[in-house]
Image (tube, helix red, strand yellow):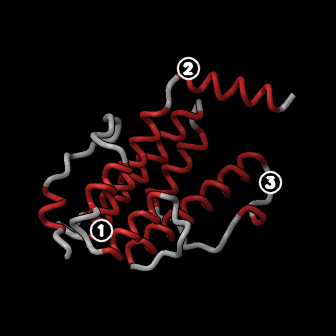
């Protein structure tokens, strides 16, 4: 039995830059009893980085958009380095003006954190877009989950963790 209205209405609001109000694992656990098994499996697949094929329209829309974003980033980085972009591209649609602008801003950013923030804000905006005309359905649940993943990623970043990872990387590569 699917009861999206109840489930969606109980979710706390999310804002880019805030601490996540729950983990994506908690979200999945909480959603289990309120949505269909097929939808839950699709959310689980999204949480795991889509190890299974995307089955519904919004999953495919997100996947195509992400591929276009990756291609746009690869092309912009190749151009910045004066390299041929063709070897780095996969099939994809064309980027809209918002994406092109954000990619250029990210590539020109003074540091990696600012570049990542620009791209994650672009992702957030697209997730808002794909759920904007929906109230209590899979699109909203998927958007919420993917936003939680973004918040979790940022919450896990801190200077000490970064230094530890860099030191381990340097030791491994010696």
- Looking at the image, residue 139 lies above or below residue 128: below
Q: Is residue 172 left or right of residue 165?
A: right
Where residue 66 sits in the image (x, y, percent)? 51, 62
Q: Residue at x 56, y 65 (%)?
A: 67
Q: Residue at x 76, y 46 (%)?
A: 81
Kindly check if marks 3 and 1 are in contact, taking CB atoms under 8 A apart as contact: no
Q: Residue at x 52, y 41 (%)?
A: 116
Q: Quadrant of residue 39?
A: bottom left
User: Dividing the image into 4 quarters, which one contains the C terminus?
Assistant: top right
Kindly check if marks 2 and 3 are in contact, taking CB atoms under 8 A apart as contact: no
Is any part of residue 133 visible from this angle? no
Q: Quadrant of residue 113?
A: top right
Label 2: which secondary element: helix
Q: What residue sits right under mark 2 in the picture? A: 160
Where residue 145 sits in the image (x, y, percent)? 35, 55
Q: Is residue 156 left or right of residue 15?
A: right
Q: Which mark is residue 139?
A: 1
Q: Earlier in the sequence, mark 3 or mark 1?
A: 3
Label 3: which secondary element: loop
Front residue of 157/106: it is 157
All told, the count of numbered labels is 3
Q: Which mark is residue 83?
A: 3
Q: Is residue 108 left or right of residue 170?
A: left
């Amino acid at each position: 039995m699917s009861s999206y209205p109840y489930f969606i209405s109980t979710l706390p609001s999310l804002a880019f830059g805030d601490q996540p109000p729950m983990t994506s694992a908690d979200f999945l656990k909480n959603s289990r009893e309120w949505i269909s098994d097929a939808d839950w499996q699709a959310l689980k697949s999204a949480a795991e980085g889509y190890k299974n094929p995307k089955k519904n329209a919004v999953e495919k829309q997100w996947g195509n958009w992400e591929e276009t974003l990756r291609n746009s980033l690869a092309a912009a980085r190749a151009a910045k380095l004066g390299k041929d972009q063709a070897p780095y591209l996969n099939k994809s649609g064309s980027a809209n003006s918002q994406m092109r602008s954000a990619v250029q801003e990210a590539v020109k950013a003074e540091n990696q954190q600012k570049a990542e923030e620009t791209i994650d804000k672009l992702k957030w905006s697209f997730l808002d877009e794909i759920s904007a005309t929906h109230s209590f359905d899979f699109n909203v649940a998927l958007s919420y989950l993917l936003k939680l993943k973004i918040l979790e990623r940022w919450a896990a970043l801190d200077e000490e963790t970064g230094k530890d990872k860099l030191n381990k990387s340097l030791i491994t590569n010696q």
